Each structure stands twice: as structure tokens, then as C-alpha cells.
Amino acid sequence: MEKLTQRAKELALCYGASAVGVVTREMLAGGPPSADISYVLPRAGSAVSFCVPLDQAYIEDWFSKKSRKAHFQDNIRKNAIASGISLELANYLTQKGYPSTPLTANTSYRRDTKRGFLDEKPPVSHRYLAVRSGVGYFGLSGNVLTRKEGAAVILGSVVTEAELIPTEPLAGSENYCDDCRLCEASCASGYINGRERVSVTLGGLEFSYTQKRHHSRCDYVCGGFAGLHKSGEWSTWSPARFPIPEEDEAFYPALLHAVGPYLKRPKPDMAVFNVIMPGDKVELTCGNCQLICHPDKAVRKARYKMLTRSGVVVQHADGSREAVSPEKAREHLAGMDDDRRALYEELEAGSAGSKE
């Protein structure tokens, strides 16, 4: 089994992964439902976890609002690569005589929860496999941090009947997370609650990270339905200015309210296909909590500074986007007629917009 384990790792690295680990079923015992690898393969013996790095060269332009396309395309490609590695590795192990199941990188959800796929619970959590096998460790945000690329990675996994040789989790001393809270500060939705922590036990080992608020916060802001930070000084790549509620209970109604305008705005030139989103497609306009978390704290601070000075994104009639000052963004919206302006923000009763 040692030779097969080594070959499995080599395959993942050869096809684009930057780190690979192996976790057994026993090492995940006692965890949440999404730590149970037998859910996707009843006779599962182990799972291979790996990460594919996002291109660091595109991240600063994303934060500074110089370029949206490069990182967006890179994110789509790396998700496809991670899913492809899973498929290739599962096929390899199956051909070796060990039935295996590939797990897509993202947007795959269970249907046996209370609200089905709307609960956004994965069949198996890539994060649990990654931290238990030593691919990375939990940061404050709950994202998996890797030693080299930080949180800027796409995770992938394969569950197999082969009882591959496991790898050890990383030592706590290797976790560079110092609770700087820039992940929380860079999140316009308030999804990360950095003052409360939760823990998960996997095979007798305890891992902790911050309590998340309702996942609809991330859908609403990262998906582009809204994006203006409460300071009014910067936004995500979304041109929409619909309110971002304080209470979790208000997010789902806010999301439903924003769907109509979202679908009527100029169509994005790129999209992520996701069955829980209107039209089965969603934009990528944020991801700040993941991208800001670099192992070098100086880089983290520099990225946060870029973000907070990047301005506010507006959308022109041709669909193009531009980051401008908060004052110019307000002028841009005020210059629209009411019908068009209503695609980006709530109108006050009795407002009368002029033609742009």
C-alpha cells in the first residue's frame, strides 16, 4: 500500500496540486456529518486531500480594483483543475482495483438536510480532510491555510476503498494565523464573527476556528447581489448597493429581493455555475477573506490597505465596471433614470432620477 499511496500523491502533484495528504476513516471519527467519507462511498477506507494554488500575481490587482478578469478566470480554471485531479485520481485508484469517488471542488451539496441543497452542506468537507491530513490548518476565518500559499487555494478530495497510508496533521506551531482579524475586516457581509469560536473533533484531535454567521451572507455579497461596505468607502466588485442587513434572519428575504434587479443588470462576461443561484449562475465579486490571508503579515496588511483604498465599483450601460471614489459613485447613480437606478439600489419614496 506504500507504493500506491506514493503514486496517488505523485499523480495529484504532477497534475497541479501543491500539497497532498491522506486521511483514514478512523482519523475522522467523531466529526460532523460532512466528515463521514462513507456517505459517498460505503466501504471507504481513506481519502486523499490536496490543494491547487490560485495565482498570487492576480490577487493584488483584484484588491486594488485594477483588474477583475484575471483572478476571476484563474479561480474558475483552478476549480476545474482541482475537480479534474479528483476525477483522474479516482479513475487511477479504481483501475488499480480500489473503487473510488471523486469530489468536485465546489458547489456540490447534500439533499438530505432540512432544506436540501439550499442548506449548502457538502457531501464531504474538503476542509476537514485537509486539516486532518496536514494539507493545511484552520485559520481564524475557518478557511484552510497552507504554509506556502496561505488560504489562496482550491481544495479537492478523492474517497477510496484503498486503505492508503495516512499523513499527520500539521503541528500547531506551523499555523501562522495570529488572529490579525483582517479576514473579518475585509468581509463586507459580516459573515465572520471573530469573537466567538467553535471547535470540531476529528479522530480525537480538536480543531477550532471562528463562528460563522448564516451562509446566506456570503451568497448575498460574494455572489454580487450587494457589495458596499458599511463605511461607504469601498465595495466588492459588485456594483449593487442594496442594504446588507445586520441580522441573519433578514438575509434570505434580502437575497430574494435582490434577485430581480440582479437578473436585469447587464449580464456578466464570466460566471460560476451553481444550481442554488438564480439562472444557475453566479458572479464572483469577493472572496476577500480567503485572498487576504497570506503567510506574510506584511502582505496581508498591504492587501487590506489596497482594498480599503480601492473605491466603489459602478457599472456602465455597456456592462463594464469601474472603481471610482465614493462621491463619484453617488453621482453616477444619481444620474440614472429611476428604472435603471433601481437595478443597483433601493429608491427612496418619491425619488425622481434624471436620464444619465
Image: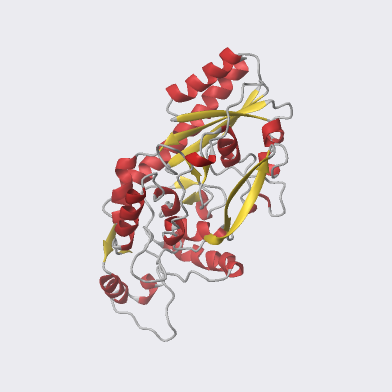
Residue at (39%, 60%) from the top-left corner? Answer: 238
27 to 312, vertically: above or below: above
Colouring style: secondary structure
The reply to whether residue 315 is visible in this rendering is no
In the picture, measured across the screen, residue 234 lies left or right of residue 199, that is left
The number of numbered badges drawn on the structure is 0
Give x and y (percent) for residue 86: 53, 29
User: Is there any visible trace of residue 209 in the rendered image?
Assistant: yes
Q: Nearer the viewer, residue 101 or 2?
A: 2
Q: Locate residue 354, reporting x and y percent.
A: 29, 79
User: From the viewer's perspective, is residue 291 above or below residue 132?
Assistant: below
Return the residue nearer the eye: 290 or 41.
290
In the displayed image of the protein, which residue is found farthest to the front? 173
Instruction: Please tell me which residue lies in front, 90 or 19.
Output: 19
* Quarter placement of the N terminus: top right
Name the spot of residue 309 as percent of width and height, x first. Answer: 29, 62
Q: Residue at x 48, y 69 (%)?
A: 244
Q: Quadrant of residue 310?
A: bottom left
Position of residue 326 measured from the top left corner of the image (x, y, whole percent):
29, 71
